[in-house]
Image: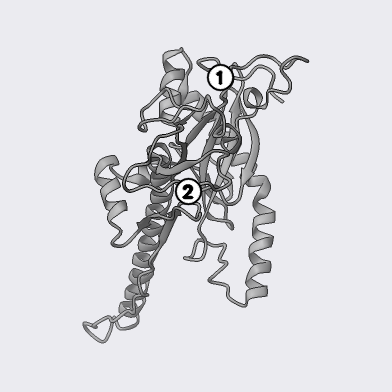
């Protein structure tokens, strides 16, 4: 427990950092520069006998705080008043308060790199076991092939001096992009919405696309897909070039030669963000490395999504 946490407007918060593991052996890891900041809904006070039971003042879990009557829904990805914000929004506030955000990111990069280095033997072992059990090496690849694609959620908390501490690692971070919005008594939902009474909230509510989740997860997943596709394209170009050189070298005394190298079929990668299914709602946002309109639209708005990632491990070594 961190007794002196960094606060945003008096509220304790944590950070969901998205980390892309492109290869396990050798270890190659990237940290996304966009993610989520999740705040408590009760102002923070140091633990004492009279407040230790106020879970929403000490625990930053979204699954807990979204049920609070004090929860504030962010209007857009730049909103600094919401209980859930983008990391960019939260760090803008920290920067105005005088904190060195670049140094904070460097500290987070080191934390992630060291953590993933410690996990590498386990990840490799599990990948090899799955390959043997399934009899399909490509499906559970560990060497950067099309079967190796893993985004993990690393939860971090900052202390009052902006030092990051690891809270936990999520192997399958939540990819839903909806918000659960309770309806005041007597208020009717919009024409396109349906009243829901699922266990996501104790009161009647609707599910709406959360622009904060949409922004952070589009960048996190879209950027990782771009890295993977670009790496595979580069590998294929080197592969084809090597074949051409070998073929030409073998026929150097026989005059010009027509090289017909077989290119491997392009691989399609898709990531789907799905609303948590309930009796009343079901929807999805799809990103595709090929012809997905969402990824192209996001690229026009945010430029190269790949540029939001920083490599922190290369060839199994922590990068400085």
261 is higher (above) or lower (below) than 2? below
Q: Which residue is mark 2?
A: 176
In this picture, residue 65 sits left or right of residue 55: left
Residue reaching furthest to the left: 256
Instruction: Label 2: state its secondary structure.
Output: loop
Q: Position of residue 112 (x, y in %)?
A: 58, 39
Labelled disc at residue 192: none
Residue drawn where x is 36% and y is 60% of the image: 234
Name the image quarter holding the N terminus.
top right
**Splitting the image into 4 quarters, where does residue 266 fall?**
bottom left
Density class for disc 1 (Cα within 10 Å; few <14, some 14-19, many ≥20) is: many
Q: Position of residue 16 (x, y in %)?
A: 53, 37
293 is higher (above) or lower (below) than 17? below
Q: CA distance from mark 2 to mark 1?
A: 25 Å
In this picture, residue 139 sits left or right of residue 210: right
Whichever of callouts 2 and 1 sits on the residue coming sooner in the sequence is 1
Residue reaching furthest to the front: 186
Q: Which residue is mark 1?
A: 11
**Splitting the image into 4 quarters, where does residue 228 fall?**
bottom left
Q: Position of residue 154 (x, y in %)?
A: 58, 40
Instruction: Label 1: state its secondary structure.
Output: strand
How many marks the image carries: the answer is 2
Density class for disc 2 (Cα within 10 Å; few <14, some 14-19, many ≥20) is: some
Q: How is the image coloured?
A: one colour
Q: Position of residue 281 (x, y in %)?
A: 44, 53
Residue reaching furthest to the right: 49
In this picture, residue 192 sits left or right of residue 124: left
Viewer-proximal residue, 228 or 62? 62
Residue drawn where x is 46% and y is 33% of the image: 185
Viewer-proximal residue, 164 or 272? 272
48 is higher (above) or lower (below) than 191? above
């Amino acid at each position: 427990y961190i007794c002196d946490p960094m606060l945003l407007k008096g509220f304790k918060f944590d950070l969901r950092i998205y980390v892309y593991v492109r290869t396990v052996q050798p270890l190659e890891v990237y940290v996304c520069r966009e993610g989520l900041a999740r705040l408590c809904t009760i102002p923070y006070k140091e633990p004492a006998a009279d407040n230790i039971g106020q879970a929403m003042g000490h625990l930053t879990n979204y699954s807990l705080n979204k049920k609070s009557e004090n929860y504030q829904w962010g209007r857009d990805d730049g909103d600094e008043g919401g209980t859930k914000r983008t990391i960019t929004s939260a760090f803008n506030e920290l920067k105005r308060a005088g904190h060195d955000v670049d140094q904070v990111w460097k500290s987070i990069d080191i934390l992630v790199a060291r953590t993933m280095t410690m996990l590498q033997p386990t990840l490799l072992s599990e990948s090899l076991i799955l390959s043997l059990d399934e009899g399909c090496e490509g499906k559970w690849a560990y060497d950067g092939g099309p079967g190796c694609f893993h985004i993990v959620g690393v939860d971090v908390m900052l202390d009052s001096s902006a030092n990051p501490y690891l809270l936990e690692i999520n192997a399958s971070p939540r990819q839903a992009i909806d918000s659960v919005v309770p309806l005041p008594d007597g208020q009717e939902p919009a024409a396109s919405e349906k009243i829901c009474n699922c266990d996501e909230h104790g009161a009647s509510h609707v599910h709406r696309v959360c622009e904060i989740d949409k922004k952070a997860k589009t960048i996190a997943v879209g950027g990782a897909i771009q890295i993977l596709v670009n790496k595979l394209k580069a590998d294929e170009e080197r592969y084809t070039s090597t074949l051409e050189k070998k073929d030409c070298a073998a026929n150097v005394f026989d005059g010009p030669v027509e090289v017909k190298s077989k290119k491997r079929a392009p691989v399609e990668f898709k990531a789907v963000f799905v609303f948590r299914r309930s009796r009343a709602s079901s929807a999805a946002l799809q990103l595709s490395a090929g012809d997905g309109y969402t990824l192209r639209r996001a690229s026009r708005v945010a430029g190269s999504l790949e540029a939001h990632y920083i490599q922190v491990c290369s060839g199994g070594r922590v990068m400085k």
